[in-house]
Amino acid sequence: MKQLPPAPLLNRRYSLPTTGFFAFVCVYMIVTLATGFNFLAVVAVAIALSAALFVLIEVIFLRRVNLWLLLSYLVTMGGLLLFYLIRGADPFGRRLWYNLVLTALPIAIAVLLLFGDKLFDPKRMHARVRFALPVLLTLTMLGSTVMYFLAMGIRVRPTVASLQKGHDDYLRSVEAAKQAGSPNVLVILMDDMAYADLSCYSYLGNRNATIQTPNIDSIGDQGILMTDFYSASPVCSPSRFSMLTGRYPSRGYLDNVVFPTAVSFAPFGSTRYFNPFQFLNNVDGILGDEITLAEVLQAGGYRTGLIGKWNLGDYGEYLPTNQGFDYFYGSYYVNDMTPYNMVREIDGKATEVHSHADLKDQSETTRILSEELDRFISDSADAGNPFFAYYCTPWPHYPIFSGVKGDTTDDSYIDCIEEFDAYLGKTFDLMRQKGVFDDTLIIFTSDNGPGREGVTGALRGRKNTTFDGGHKVPLLACYVNGGLGQGAALGDTNVIATPSMNFDLFPTILSYCGIDRLPDDRVIDGKNLYDIWQGNVSPETRVHDALYFIKGGKVQGLQMPLSLDGTTCDFKYYEKVRTENSAFIDQVYKNYLFNLTLDPAEGYNVSMKYPEIADTMLRRLHAFRNELKTNRRGISPAYYGD
């Protein structure tokens, strides 16, 4: 019997599944290139992996290469190369060589397989070799695609409406109106510290508080303490955005925590894939056309420094020194992320000072950052420069460390905060020695509620919930020579109860620094608290007609002052909110209304008793959601001529 010749290696036959897949891939990559969304590119890698895997399976079991799967693979990998060359955010030269290195081998193998019938001629090649080589090549193609996935850089330029013109015009106006005699500014920001963790906020009373914080308490003793101060988000990055810009986090597309974008090969440590699926429009941090507090003060003649945690982006426009800080010393990330290191950054260029390996033991962090803060303040004072120091400790975010050694009497969380308080006392002593303490506006707060540990007092919920335990934080402020807290309206108290949010710090700090004009090209959600802090008006004065509580980009609830039986009460309303009780995590509460004036613990739903109040607040909630939907960035049409 005459032996049949070997079948061609390349199978060109049409079949609905493979040709349909090829058509889908072509359309998908066209959409990816046209829209420029990085999450589509990440999914494209999964498509390429699937195509390579099916090619390998056919080669092993059917001893042939499917043309349409191979073409699908080539279109995907070639499209990814083109996508990052066109859309990438890194400098073009780096994008070019880096992506060529990653894609050269898999694309070359796919091209070789396309010419397989000529390369693997059965007349010149043993049957076993003719089988083994395509298997080896397709295995290498699949492996190199896996390597591409592990090593790909997914930094892509954001696709958002630009506010750069208003940004530049405003900062020029501030620079033109510089004035002398403004106070120094020191903002101290804790990470995940609970509302009642300070002794001055303790539900046990100052004297009996579990954690003793005399130096932090002293800020309020010399100024004011706010009882109803909220973060703009129950997690850190969005909250920090709001404090620096005076705007709700959704206006900057910052809906969640910013993760590292740098490539990391540590097992399960590369979290750069999170950002594309958390943030819309390729946002990887605080956009360069946002106007930050640091930029305004820098334009106003201040020396600006950030010491500690940033967590608002780790490259390009997102870097601290590209956002108004002359100097940055600290970490771009949270202390439980990989990599977690510390850098010194000047003019957008960072030098590592403590590696990830160095910081496996973070017990010296408070000392390191405190000494750097002291150096910045001392150098500024010696040079006679007004300064803005933004001190963002990583504590008491988990994992918790402290430099207290050999002390087994206290929980490390307690040690961590008390150690921080002690070092802060040394900073205050230095400021007094340098003669700048009384001329410095000092503000202390936290970015959101507590995670694993910490005491919220009677508040419901914790971090990552929109209940008050996730949002309500301490706020202490003083400015000795500025008369903060000394006005007649405060009488003999330093306590202010008006509800406010951390984006109010933007206009308030600028007002203290003699900058009363705010940007007019965008919505500034923050309100100026100057007169309330000074005691020029009643501490009960309302500055907001509503405060909104946002999680993951979704507006879940709002707080409003409304009249009830002739008395103004603060109500909080949720149209829909998931329970904070892990035992019933599948439960979602609907139409929840709380009278915070009578029920600050949010324990009793009164929507059935006051349906008209619930309806009023629901309409207000829907109106704000619609505002964010139609004009998410809060752009002023009049300014941009639209």
Image (spheres, rainbow, N blue to C red):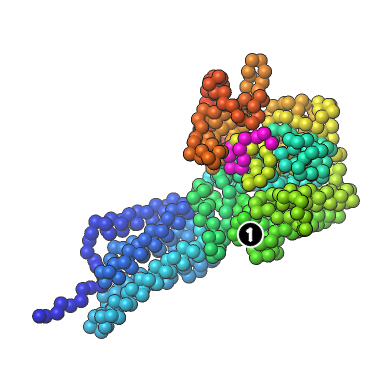
Where, quadrant-wise, is the N terminus in this rendering? bottom left
User: At 80% from the left edge and 41% from the top edge, which residue is drawn?
Assistant: 217
As rendered, which of 283 and 412 lies closer to the eye?
412
Left or right, 289 with reference to 630: right
Note whether residue 632 is visible: no
Left or right, 70 with reference to 566: left
Residue 458, percent across and down? 67, 34
Residue 538, percent across and down? 77, 25
User: At 66% from the left edge and 24% from the top edge, which residue is drawn?
Assistant: 598
Identified by mark 1, the residue type is: Tyr
User: Which residues make up the magenta segment?
Assistant: 457-466
Left or right, 537 with reference to 164: right
Q: Residue 378 occupies which quadrant of the picture?
A: bottom right
Residue 45 to residue 502: above or below: below
Crowd tier of the residue under label 1, counting other residues whose Cα lies within 10 Å: few below 14, some 14–19, many 20 or above: many
Magenta region includes residue 57: no
Q: Residue furthest top?
A: 565
Query: Which residue is disc 1 drawn over?
Result: 340
Q: Is the magenta stretch mostly helix, strand or loop?
A: loop
User: At 29% from the left edge and 76% from the top edge, which residue is drawn?
Assistant: 131
User: At 48% from the left edge and 60% from the top edge, which residue is drawn?
Assistant: 84
As rendered, which of 53 and 512 lies closer to the eye?
53
Q: Which residue lies furthest to the left in this view?
A: 1
